[in-house]
Amino acid sequence: MTEQEVRDLLTNALVTLFEIEPDRIKPETNLYEDLEIDSIDAIDLIDHIKRETGRKLQAEDFRNVRTVDDIVQAVLRLQAE
């Protein structure tokens, strides 16, 4: 997947799973403070990414994630492995 495809996947997931307005989702948007994603939501998001990409972000990878762009970069790193 390209970086844009990962961004689109993530935006779609945030809109579909958590009913977040697409215009609130920017690379620098903080998942926890700006979008009010909690730890249970994060698990749902990891599961959604796994289903869509076939790659699972580990919980420890997700601990360091703060922004939308952090998730995109984490998924891209997984693909590179």
Image (cartoon, helix red, strand yellow):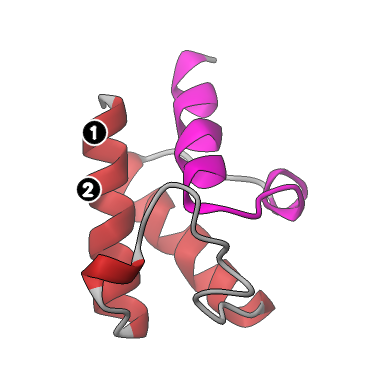
Who's the residue at 30% across and 44% down the image? 7
Q: Residue 1: x percent and y percent? A: 26, 27
- Residue at 65% over, 55% down: 66
Residue 75 picture location, percent across and down: 47, 35
Q: In the figure, 76 relative to 25: above or below?
A: above
Q: Residue at the spot x=26%, y=74% of the render?
A: 15
Residue 78 location in percent, x, y?
A: 52, 27
Specify the segment rendered in magenta: 59-80
| Mark 2, secondary structure of its residue | helix
Location of residue 74 with respect to 11 vertically, above or below = above
Give the residue pinned by disc 1: 4
- Label 1: how many residues lie within 10 Å, few (<14), some (14-19) or many (20+)? few
Q: How far, Cα to Cα, is label 1 from label 2?
A: 6 Å
The residue identified by callout 2 is 8
Give, as a three-letter code, the residue at label 1. Gln
Magenta stretch: includes residue 48: no
Tell whether label 2 touches label 1 (CB within 8 Å): yes
Q: How many marks?
A: 2
Query: Magenta region, mostly helix, strand or loop?
Result: helix
